[in-house]
Image (tube, rainbow, N blue to C red):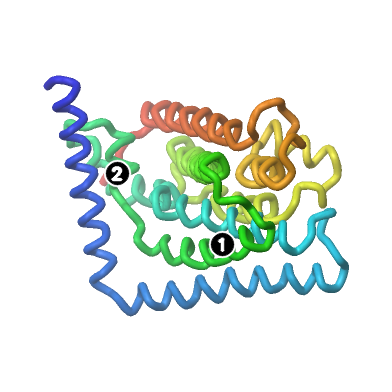
Amino acid sequence: MSGVKTIRYYASVAAISIRQSIQSRLEYPFMLIGHVLANCIQWVVGFATIKFVVDQFGSIGGWGYESLAFLYGMSVLSHGLAVVLFIQTWFLGYWMIDGEFDRFLLRPMNLIFQFLFDDFNLIGFTDILPGLMVFVYGCVKVHLSPSCGNILLILCTLAGGTLIRGAVWMFCGSMSFWTKSPANFTDMVGELFERVSMYPLTIYPRWVQALFTVLLPLAWITFWPVKDLLEPGTGILPVPMAAVTLAVGLLLFAGSCAVFRAGMGRYESAGS
C-alpha cells in the first residue's frame, strides 16, 4: 500500500470511528443534556469562586480579575479538548484486565492509532462550552486584539496544552502495563492540572514554579503562554511562549507514546 493510500485508509478509519463514537453517545440524549448542565454549573461556579476571592483580596498572585478570566477560560478549553480526544487513556488499565485491549492486537493497523481513535468523547464538548464562554468573556475584559498573530498564538497554546494533558494521562495509563492494575495517578494528575493551569503560577514558592516549569511542565498549559499574550516580552525565553507550549506538548506526547510502546512489550493479555 502506497503512502498516500495508507494515509487515506487511516483517515477513513478514523472518520468511521469518530462517527460511531458520536452515534453511540447520542443514543442517550438526556445523559448528554445532563452533562451540559452539570459541567456548565461546575465551571461557572469555579469561576465565580475566583471572582469572589478577587473581590475580597484584590488579586490572586498579582493577577486581576480580567486576566484570571482569560487564564481560566483557556484552561477549561484545553481540558475539554483533552477529554474529547484522550479520555480513553483513563481506562487503559480496565481494558487490559477485561480483555478489551486484545482486540487491538488482532487488527492489521498501528496500535497507538487504534487506541487513540477508539473513543471520540462527545461528552467532552460539555466542558468546552462553558470554557468557551469564559474565554470569550476574558478576551473582552483584557481587550485582546483579534489579530491573526494573537489567534495563531491562542491556537498554538490550546494545541500544546491539550497535548500536554493527553501525554500525562497516557503516561499514567501506560503504567498499568507494569502494575497489572487499573489503578493509576489520573485523579491526582487531574487535581494538579486544575491547581496549576487555572491559577497564576506566582501563587506558589519559586521552587514550585521551577518544578512545574521544568521537571513537570504543567505551567506551559496556560500560565506562561497566557502571561506572554497579556504582557508581550515577559516570558522566560526569547521566543513566543505559545510556540514553546506547542513544542513541549509534542515532545511530551512523543515520549508518552514511547512509554506506551515499551509497555506493550510487557503486555500478557487478559488470560482466562
128, above or below 166, in the image: below
Q: Where residue 124 sits: x, y (%)?
A: 42, 60
> Which quadrant would residue 27 be assigned to in this image?
bottom left
Position of 12 with respect to 183 (left or right) is left
- The spot of residue 234 in percent (x, y) is 77, 37
- The residue at which mark 1 appears reads as 136
Q: Residue furthest top?
A: 2
Quick one: label 1, few (<14), some, or many (20+) residues within 10 Å?
A: some
Q: Give above or below for 52 relative to 13.
A: below
Q: Look at the numbered disc 2 and give the secondary structure of its residue.
A: loop
Q: Residue at x 72, y 55 (%)?
A: 199
Label at residue 251: none
> Which mark is nearer the camera, 2 or 1?
1
User: Disc 2 or 1, which lies upstream in sequence?
Assistant: 2
Q: Secondary structure at mark 1?
A: helix
Which residue is disc 2 drawn over? 101
Camera-side residue of 192 and 262: 192
The image position of residue 91, as x and y in percent, is 41, 52
